């Protein structure tokens, strides 16, 4: 059966914790790639102590959730897409309530054995393995040149008039593993000034994690006619930056930003703003080993990058797993829907 035959006219629930926009975006990207037509998001709200114990503790589920009526009331979907440790137990319960009919997909390592789920989609730097585990380069995303073209904002049409080379600079900041100090920001600014000296035009976006002092420093030192800086005010030019860029520079604190940059097919340079945790460091090492990114050291680089086809591969493998699942569960009736 083809992917369209499998997922057309299916219903899906996305199960995530509120506020984890990056996590939710991965779930949305997957349902869009699969062309699931009816998608509804249900948000996890947990009580103490379960909020700290998820996903390892299965007892006391009836008391674990603040919103059980909104979370568990049917009719139940054909497909469950869950991500984040607090979502795992709830997703498993919804599958059970569906009479076992719902196909449970978990995005990112659930910290439980893969055989407990119908499919697990995890990045290559996660240790989880199994017959139903689909490994990706990084985070699932919606990025392609067609997607970017369709999502251009007329408010940012002036970016197309900036001189070449145009460089999108995606700046994160402080994480639980690393600070983004003022001196870190100064070091990054110094390298970006070298690009401007060479004639590059910069399109810079900061984040909430960048810090106000650091953001003000970036604006003060780099802001001029050949630099666009978005600091969270007004409409977000993120997709426009990716579309118009000839090169992309990404700080090394984010898996999502790096993966989305790679998905454009453009040269991606990684700016080191501090040592990150083991998982993210492993992620970036694999990208370098695969020749997908180069370090940013104050100059632009050109090289032939490998093709990025994560989303196509994921949808093909999921289609195979779902086809097998439907055949194995053909006897399950529709009484739960």
Image: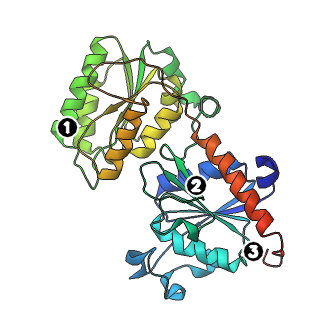
Q: What is the distance, in whole Å, between disc 3 and disc 2 at their CAs? A: 20 Å
Mark nearer the N terminus (1 vs 3):
3
Q: Identify the mark at residue 75; answer none if there is no mark.
A: 3
- Residue bearing the label numbered 1: 184
- The percent coordinates of residue 28 (x first, y second) are 60, 52
Q: Depth check: give the residue in front, 170 or 299.
A: 299
Q: Circle 2: is it few (<14), some (14-19), or many (20+) Cα within 10 Å?
A: many
- Residue bearing the label numbered 2: 27
Q: What is the distance, in whole Å, between disc 2 and disc 1 at their CAs? A: 33 Å
Query: Up-down: is 199 above or below 292?
Result: above
Question: Label 1 near label 2: C-beta < 8 Å?
Answer: no
- The percent coordinates of residue 281 (x first, y second) are 31, 45
The quarter of the rendered structure image containing the C terminus is: bottom right
Residue at 73% across, 63% down: 325
Q: Circle 1: is it few (<14), some (14-19), or many (20+) Cα within 10 Å?
A: some
The answer to whether residue 234 shows anywhere in this view is no
Query: Up-down: is 29 above or below 192?
Result: below
The answer to whether residue 136 shows anywhere in this view is yes
Q: Depth check: give the residue in front, 43 or 233.
A: 43
Mark nearer the N terminus (2 vs 1):
2
Mark nearer the N terminus (3 vs 2):
2
Q: Identify the mark at residue 9; answer none if there is no mark.
A: none
Question: Label 3 near label 1: C-beta < 8 Å?
Answer: no
Query: Up-down: is 153 above or below 110?
Result: above
Q: What is the distance, in whole Å, between disc 1 and disc 3 at their CAs? A: 52 Å
Disc 2 on helix, strand or loop?
A: helix
Quadrant hosting residue 93? bottom right
Quadrant hosting residue 95? bottom right
- The percent coordinates of residue 9 (x first, y second) are 81, 56
């Amino acid at each position: 059966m083809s992917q369209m035959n499998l997922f057309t006219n299916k219903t899906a629930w996305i199960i995530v914790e509120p506020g984890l926009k990056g996590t939710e975006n991965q779930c949305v990207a997957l349902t869009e790639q699969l062309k699931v037509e009816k998608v509804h998001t249900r948000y996890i709200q947990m009580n103490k102590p379960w909020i700290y114990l998820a996903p390892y503790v299965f007892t006391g589920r009836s008391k674990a959730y603040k919103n059980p009526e909104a979370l568990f009331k049917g009719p139940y979907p054909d497909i469950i897409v869950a991500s984040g440790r607090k979502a795992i137990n709830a997703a498993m319960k919804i599958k059970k309530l569906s009479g076992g009919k719902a196909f449970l997909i978990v995005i990112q390592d659930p910290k439980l054995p893969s055989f407990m789920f119908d499919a697990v989609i995890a990045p290559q730097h996660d240790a989880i393995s199994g017959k139903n585990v689909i490994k990706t380069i990084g985070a699932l995303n919606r990025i392609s040149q067609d997607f970017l073209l369709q999502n251009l904002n007329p408010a940012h049409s002036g970016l197309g008039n900036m001189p070449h080379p145009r460089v999108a600079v995606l700046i994160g900041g402080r994480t639980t593993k690393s600070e983004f100090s003022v001196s870190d920001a100064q070091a990054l600014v110094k390298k970006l000034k070298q690009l401007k000296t060479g004639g590059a035009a910069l399109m810079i976006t900061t984040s909430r994690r960048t810090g106000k002092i650091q953001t003000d420093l970036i604006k003060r030192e780099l802001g001029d006619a050949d630099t666009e800086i978005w600091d969270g005010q007004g409409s977000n030019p993120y997709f426009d930056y990716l579309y118009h860029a000839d090169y992309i520079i990404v700080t090394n604190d984010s898996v999502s930003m790096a993966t989305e940059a790679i998905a454009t097919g453009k040269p991606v340079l990684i700016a080191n703003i501090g040592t990150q945790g083991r998982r993210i460091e492993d992620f970036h090492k694999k990208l370098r080993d695969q020749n997908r990114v180069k370090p940013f050291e104050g100059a632009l680089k050109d090289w032939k990058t490998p093709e990025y086809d994560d989303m196509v591969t994921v949808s093909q493998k999921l289609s195979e797993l779902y086809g097998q699942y439907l055949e194995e569960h053909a006897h399950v009736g529709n009484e739960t829907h």
